[in-house]
Amino acid sequence: MKSLAFYNNKGGVGKTTSVINIAYQLALADNKVLVVDLDGQGNASRFFTDSPKDGLAQALTKPVVTPDVARCETRYPNIDIITSTQELNNISSQFEQFPADRRSQIAKKIVGYNDEPWYAADYDYVLVDLPPALNCLTESIISACDYVFVPIELGLFAIQGIPNVTGIISSCGTKFGGCFVNKFDRENPADLGLFELLKTTLGDKTMQNYLPFSRVIKNSISFRMTASEYMEWTFAAECCKKLTQEIIEICGG
Ligand SMILES: Nc1ncnc2c1ncn2[C@@H]1O[C@H](COP(=O)(O)OP(=O)(O)O)[C@@H](O)[C@H]1O
Ligand SMILES: [Mg+2]
């Protein structure tokens, strides 16, 4: 089992959209996937299930509560989700009060699912959709994951902010899987230039595959479909597939 955090301290860059599409592609390739929605907005939860369960906040604050209380099956046989609800918005300050070893123990309980004695292991990938906040909770969860992936929307300020994000990742001690571009506009010369600047800034941590700015990606989510389910034959769907393949390779196949 591999646990992958999707993190960027900015909102709206496509963390949730990419987690949804990558989870689907991994599942298509016969992997058993657990999505962990750690964002109190609950967007991934509402995408995957009609009735998100409460309980993740308790699992994050009470040692005896397991995240299983908030685990739901989805309409995809190979994807389960630990759902979030608004209750998650109020716990980061409580979590921060815990001593460091308790924080890391709790974070491992949430993302290291298969290693837990109360659960029979069978997930191949755990994908964690994080909120755009940098706090003790997000740091602990990143630290407990095997890899972090960073979706970025190209822009000068976003690229200038990248060393800050990579600094956070290295202070967590987690492997930096790579940074991929979302909402890429390949017909915009400015985007091509910014992509080059990103490569200069990040070197080989810049991933080769990206997700295009695409109505297929945007609209599919509104219909509660992944890009491939909505329009399998499109470039956008192809990009979701290729990006997932690259992630699988980075994580060692
Ligand atoms: N590749 C894309 N093309 C077009 N719209 C996108 C794309 N990726 C995300 N969006 C839209 O951008 C908005 C923010 O995406 P979201 O995944 O919720 O970001 P985050 O989780 O980082 O806050 C949503 O309205 C989503 O539909
Ligand atoms: Mg989100």
Image (cartoon, grey):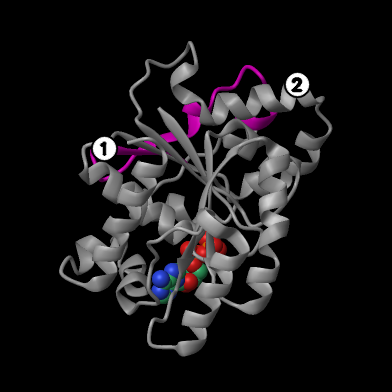
Where does the magenta region start and end?
59-83
- Residue 15: x and y in percent read 50, 58
> In the rendered image, which residue does mark 1 sit on?
78
Closer to the chain start, of discs 2 and 1, is 1
Mark 1 CB within 8 Å of ligand 1: no
Nearest to viewer (mark 2 / mark 1):
2
- In the orientation shown, which residue stands out farthest toward the left? 233
Quarter of the figure with the N terminus: top left
Residue 236, compared with residue 246, is above or below; it is: below
For residue 133: magenta?
Answer: no
Dot 2: what SS? Answer: helix
> In the rendered image, which residue does mark 2 sit on?
101
- Residue 78: x and y in percent read 26, 37
Residue at the image position 20 percent from the left and 72 percent from the top: 234
For residue 67: magenta?
Answer: yes
Residue 168, compared with residue 95, is above or below; it is: below
Give the residue type at disc 2. Asp
How would you rate the neighbour count of disc 1 (Cα within 10 Å): few for under 14, some for 14-19, many for 20 or more? some
- Residue 47: x and y in percent read 38, 55
Give the residue type at disc 1. Asn
Compared across the picture, whether 12 is left or right of 180 comes to right
Quarter of the figure with the C terminus: top left
Q: Which picture quadrant has residue 133?
A: bottom right
Give whichever of 241, 218 is nearer the camera: 241
Residue 161, compared with residue 44, is above or below; it is: below
Dot 1: what SS? Answer: loop
- For residue 62, say whether it is visible: no
Residue at the image position 21 percent from the left and 45 percent from the top: 28
Residue at the image position 84 percent from the left and 32 percent from the top: 97
Residue at the image position 55 percent from the left and 78 percent from the top: 194
